[in-house]
Image (cartoon, rainbow, N blue to C red):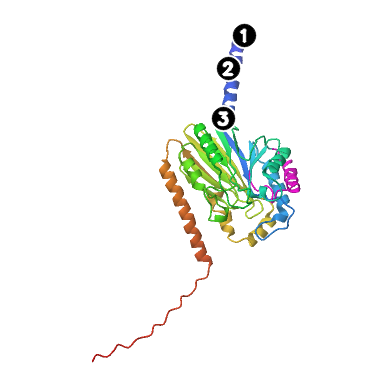
Amino acid sequence: MKNKLTKIFVILGLIIAITTGCYAFSFRNMTLDFVQISDTHITNRASTSYKALGNSRELLTVAVEQINNIVGLDFVLFTGDMVDSANDENFYNFYSILSKLKYPSLNTFGNHEFYGDMTKEQVLETVRKYNPNYVFDDTYYAFSPKTDYRIIVLDANIKDNKIAMGEIPQEQLEFLDKELYENQDKVVVIAMHHAVVEPFVAKEHSIVNAKEMTDILAKYNNPIVVLSGHYHTTKIRRIGNLVFVSTPSMVTYPMAFRHIKITNYKDRVVYNFDFIETKLEDIREQNRQNVISYGTLAGLEKDRNTQFIYNKKKHKSARYKRNKIKRVEKETKTSKKEIKKLTQPKKLKKQKKTKKVAKPQEV
């Protein structure tokens, strides 16, 4: 009898251990936990009124320390402009600081990665040399960190002209469409430097063929998050299953990065966005006093710290999403005009003096 009880307890213990292990694995697999950090602009140049370039290495060093204090991250994603210009010294300084990061890192490429004397091939070779995680052949790629997720990285840089404006090549649009078609059962995270939906109007920074990309996105109903930098500002927009996230720069107020946690349940997806500012408060405050419209750069509270749930069964049509994106773009333009009206002094209209002409006398 004693032996039978022992066997029963052993079997029960094994069942509990296996079941607990399965649930733990399943839960970790359904949750993607990572940091997005953008526009670190590592350089030896002096600061400007807009960018604290002289403190770029110090700011990234402290950010790495803060990220290391977050428990259980899957990876850290840099969304472009890692360096202020492409040269060996800047890349060496960037990756020297990253050597202290305890989590794996990957990156998109920003326009500043192609400012300088390096070709695209040389930039890729340098990144591969310093970061063993970058095993991709080009500046755009896709991978699955977990079975419930697909990460798609795009590159909208116009490299030949070395300008801030972006354009998505046709081959990448086809690559995006194919990836989305093949991964409709997953949560998709798209990472790129340029913003496909502008957080504010800046035509010199926009993607000239953004509509081609948003039309592709609108066709699909699985949860899709698009992460970007470039504008040095803070914004989150939700359009049905689409979430557009702009994250600020580490060298411009508010000098912050995002801790993003996405949990993919059977019937819903829960998004958590935590906004983490650098601990170097004196540098942040000094830069805040220098920049124009620092409130726009910092965003509203809902653009910084927020949680929301997307219910998978509540699909929006492609037409609805396309029209909503158009409305968002129109509202962005309108708000920009309103800001301009508020900041510019009103000019008094000069009233034209009209001479009274005497009526001719009747004869």
* Residue 229 visible in this rendered orientation of the protein: yes
Identify residue for label 2.
12
Q: Residue furthest left?
A: 363
Q: Quadrant of residue 19?
A: top right
Packing grade of label 3 (10 A; few <14, some 14-19, many >=20) is few
Give the Cα distance between marks 2 and 1: 14 Å
| Numbered range of the magenta stretch | 78-102
Q: Earlier in the sequence, mark 2 or mark 1?
A: 1
Find residue 123 and report its horizontal and vertical position in percent.
69, 43
Residue at x 44%, y 48% (from the top left corner):
324
Residue at x 58%, y 54% (from the top left corner):
298
Under tag 3, what secondary structure? loop
Packing grade of label 1 (10 A; few <14, some 14-19, many >=20) is few
Q: Quadrant of residue 292?
A: bottom right
Under tag 2, what secondary structure? helix
Identify residue for label 1.
3
Q: Is residue 243 left or right of residue 100?
A: left
Identify residue for label 3.
147
Find residue 37 and report its horizontal and vertical position in percent.
63, 45
* Residue 73 visible in this rendered orientation of the protein: no
Residue type for callout 3: Thr
Depth check: give the residue in front, 276 or 226: 226
